[in-house]
Each structure stands twice: as C-alpha cells, then as structure tokens.
Image (cartoon, helix red, strand yellow):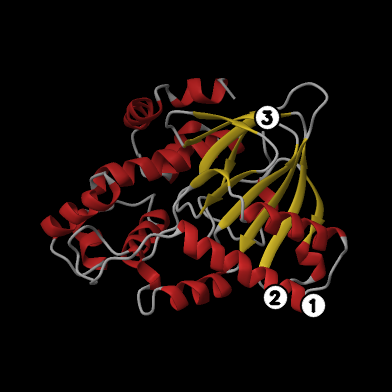
Amino acid sequence: MRNKITPDRSTAAAFPRYLTGEVVADSVALQWPGLFARRWRFPRVVDRFLVPATPEPHISCTLRGTAEFRERDVGGAWTIRKIHVGDHFVTRSRTPYEVDFQSPSGQELDVLSVHIAVEPFLSALEARYPGKADRVEVADFFGHDEILWPVCLTCAELLAARVPGKSPRVAALTQLFAAHLVEKYTSTPLKTPVYRGGLPIHQLRKVEDYVAAQLAEEISIEALAELVELSSSHFAHVFKETTGMTPLQFVTRQRITRAQQLIRETSRNLIEIGLEVGYTSPSHFAQVFRRVVGVTPTEFRSSL
C-alpha cells in the first residue's frame, strides 16, 4: 500500500511522487522553464495505481519496450491497449484515473513523460483562439503521431545531454510542443459564452473545486448553482449536458473516488473514511459504494 495519498489533482512538479517507476532524467534539475520532461524506467509488472489530474497537459511517449496497458476512470470499466515503441498518450484529464501494465518477460518500459507548463500552453491557446482560450478542451489521444515522435526523441536527447534551461533549444522545444498540441489536439470553442451546449470549462472547474473542498459537508444543488450564477433548474440541465451526469451523481462519484483513494492508500477504518467523504451512516456509505464500484468498501480493501 502506498504511503502517500494520491490527490484528485496534483501539479507537474509533484507528479513523480505518485507514479510507480524510476526517474532516470528530469528537466527540473536542469531548470527548464516551460517543460516538465522526465524519462522513466518502469519495472516489467506495475500494479494498479492512481494517476492524478494536472492543470498542465501531459504527453507520454514509449521509447523502448512493449506492454499490455490498462486504464480506467475510477470505478469504471477497464480499457486495454497494447503499447509499443512510438506510441503516445495525450491528455489533460480533469479527474484522476487508474492504470496498470505488464511487459513481456525480460523487458522494461522506457517512457518519456512531458508536461507543458500552463503559461506557454495558454499562450499557444490564446494565439490560436483569441479571447476563447479558457473554453478550449484538449482531446485525449492514444496512438502514433508522426510529428510528435521526432519531437519527443529530440526532448529525450536534450535531457540525456543535460542541456540547461537557459538554452534557446529548450525554449524552441517548448513552443513546438505547445503549438503542436494546440493545433492537433484541441477542439474549437463555443462561438459565444452562453450556456447552451453546457457550462464553460472555467465554470465547471469552479464547481469541481467546490465539491472537492466540501466532500464532508452537505452539498446542495442550490449552492452549486449559486457558484455559477444560474437558477437551480437551469444549472442542473446544463451540468448534465456538459458532464453526462446530474449534479447529485457527480457529487456521489467524487465522494466514492475519494473514498477509494483513502481505502487504497491508508489504513484508516472505514467509518472514518465514510465520514470524511460525507456519509454519517456506515450502512449508507457501504450501500452507495457498492452501487458505484460493484463491491462493498470491505471487499474493495480486501482485493488490494
């Protein structure tokens, strides 16, 4: 069981704390100002762990090795992929997700992980979507990107050569990563900031942050609606249009996601955990947990 609790969200700077593997090169030591680039060596078998969401978009590139890779939203169905040299993951997930993977005997995964710092990424967004950058989404991607592959190789080479952050090559690499991500993996924002079609991203994040901070307390639709200055009924409608869930379903998912993290990563008793995520009744907590996850909290802990 991991000693540190994996949060729902983290930052690129703290990201290595929550992954299983060995960092063999890190741009932080070289003071790269716009990129958090790390080269990882993973063991052949990596048991299930939680990857926190980050505000910085993330690119993962397989440099060596193969593996059967599984990922899922917490409590959701597993997606299984075969990853090979040259495969990329691109994401800017707003929620944590679980992964595990296994490589063939005698192999280890060698992976380049790149987070683009918020400032250069937002600058690239603003250049492409003037005045609309806060409403642009990054599309999740898995596969081979013929342009991104040589950029990742160049990044790995600069890491290996220990090129310092003051080098113009690092600045150029940062701009190239940001520009490519924006041009290929972002969607056109809504033409107007009205609420038809769902909540704008910045409003949705305001709701997410509020829920995360208030999990132990009663959370009403009225309070959430007030955050974004909408009536309760209109908020409920646009929230479901945006997320595919009612506000109540979203709050429940966030509570159970947090409960799973605490069960997985601490030895605290289940009653305490239930109270921390807003369930004063142990039986109600167990009932909701089983409905969402498929097993009781006790069964979930026993399976770890």
Mark 2 touches mark 1? (CB < 8 Å): yes
C-alpha span from label 3 to label 2: 33 Å
Crowding at label 3, few (<14), some or many (≥20) Cα neighbours within 10 Å?
Answer: many
C-alpha span from label 3 to label 1: 35 Å
Query: Residue 286 falls in which quadrant of the image?
Result: top left
Q: Which of 228 and 184 is in front in this view?
A: 184
In the drawing, what numbered circle is on residue 22? none
Which element carries disc 3, helix, strand or loop?
strand
Which of the image's four quarters has the C terminus? top right
Residue located beneath label 2 in the image: 171
Does 124 sit left or right of 62 as displayed? left
Q: Residue at x 50, y 55 (%)?
A: 92
Residue 266 shows in this picture: no
C-alpha span from label 2 to label 1: 7 Å
Q: Which of 279 and 37 is in front in this view?
A: 37
Which of the image's four quarters has the N terminus? top right
Residue located beneath label 3 in the image: 67
Residue furthest front as drawn: 146
Residue 12, given in percent of the width and then of the height, sits at: 63, 60
Q: Which residue is drawn at 27% across and 66% down?
A: 190
Crowding at label 2, few (<14), some or many (≥20) Cα neighbours within 10 Å?
Answer: some
In the drawing, what numbered circle is on residue 167? 1
